[in-house]
Image: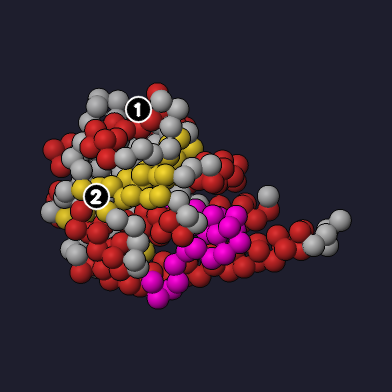
């Protein structure tokens, strides 16, 4: 579909110059939508702690909250999970726009025991590398500060429970689906790449943007806008800032995500909304037989 190709270009055009999002393709978004639509109860896992800044990073929570709220608005059961170190930040983001409940857990077993889920979504959550450790983008081992919440992926895949993942660096849960390609693209980062795979993985410019785009795609399916407004995007970033989150790239506490300031994120939100309106018009024209 032309519409999905345009959606992909809005959030996966290598704006962050990491090369990872070059692996994104429209068919991945189609598969992601099919996975979401087929699911009735979903666990969304996010949260990335930055030890050197003694704080969680701003990327991840807002994307998880926006997608989670969109799924809840489409009558699906949704719970957000994160670890205790990231809990206050994820909770603040969700409360800012009346998003889903947030639960702090230290193990994957706690997620699995909390409820029955027929799908797991990981957004900007670290996945183990080939040595069984967790590395940040600088190649540092931060396993000490990272709860093994990616272990639920292995359990889910073994039990034929769907797993969708979003990442932007290569070290996140789910990015193992692209391990060979990422090893060639980022040879100097190979030892830090995640080997944890997923049924569908979306490589994007900024992980939260992946969550936003999924909400927009679900909005097209449901024929109603389920994403956030520009004002809500500002509330989200302000809530992250007030809760003490830092930019994962600059390591500074500021109104930015992955070095992109607030105005850039607002433009992305507006672009996704405009994409939805345009796509809805096309959808309605097709339904009315204009193209027959």
- Label 2: state its secondary structure: strand
- Expressed as whole percent of the image width and height from the top left, the position of residue 122 reads 37, 43
Disc 1: which residue = 154
- Expressed as whole percent of the image width and height from the top left, the position of residue 248 reads 26, 55
Numbered range of the magenta stretch: 210-232
| Classed neighbour count for the residue bearing mark 2: other residues with Cα under 10 Å, few (<14), some (14–19), many (≥20) | some
Residue 269 seen in this snapshot: yes
- Label 1: state its secondary structure: helix
Q: Nearer the viewer, mark 1 or mark 2?
A: 2
Principal secondary structure, stretch drawn in magenta: helix
Q: Nearer the viewer, residue 280 or 247?
A: 280
| Classed neighbour count for the residue bearing mark 1: other residues with Cα under 10 Å, few (<14), some (14–19), many (≥20) | some
Q: Is residue 39 left or right of residue 114?
A: right
Residue at 47%, 64% in the rendered image: 227
- Expressed as whole percent of the image width and height from the top left, the position of residue 240 reads 25, 64
Disc 2: which residue = 103
Residue at 83%, 62% in the rendered image: 290
90 in magenta: no
Residue 141 seen in this snapshot: no
């Amino acid at each position: 579909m032309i519409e999905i190709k345009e959606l992909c270009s809005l959030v996966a055009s290598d704006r962050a110059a990491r090369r990872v999002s070059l692996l994104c393709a429209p068919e991945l978004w189609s598969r992601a939508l099919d996975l979401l639509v087929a699911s009735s109860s979903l666990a969304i896992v996010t949260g990335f702690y930055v030890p050197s800044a003694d704080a969680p990073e701003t990327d991840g929570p807002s994307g998880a909250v926006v997608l989670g709220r969109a799924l809840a608005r489409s009558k699906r059961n949704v719970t957000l999970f994160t670890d205790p170190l990231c809990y206050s930040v994820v909770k603040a983001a969700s409360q800012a726009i009346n998003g889903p409940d947030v639960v702090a857990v230290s193990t994957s077993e706690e997620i699995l025991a909390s409820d029955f889920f027929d799908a797991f979504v990981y957004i900007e959550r670290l996945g183990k590398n080939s040595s069984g450790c967790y590395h940040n983008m600088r190649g540092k081992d931060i396993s000490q500060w990272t709860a093994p919440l990616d272990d639920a992926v292995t359990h889910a895949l073994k039990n034929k429970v769907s797993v969708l993942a979003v990442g932007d660096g290569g070290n996140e849960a789910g990015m193992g689906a692209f391990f060979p390609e990422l090893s060639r693209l980022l040879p100097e980062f190979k030892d830090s790449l995640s080997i944890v795979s997923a049924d569908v993985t979306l490589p994007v410019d900024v992980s939260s943007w992946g969550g936003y785009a999924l909400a927009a795609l679900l909005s097209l399916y449901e024929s109603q806008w389920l994403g956030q407004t520009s004002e809500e995007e500002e509330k989200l970033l302000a809530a992250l800032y007030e809760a003490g989150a830092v930019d994962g790239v600059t390591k500074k506490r500021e109104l930015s995500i992955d070095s992109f300031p607030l105005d850039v994120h607002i433009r992305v939100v507006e672009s996704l909304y405009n994409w939805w309106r345009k796509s809805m018009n096309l959808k309605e024209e097709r339904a009315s037989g204009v193209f027959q």
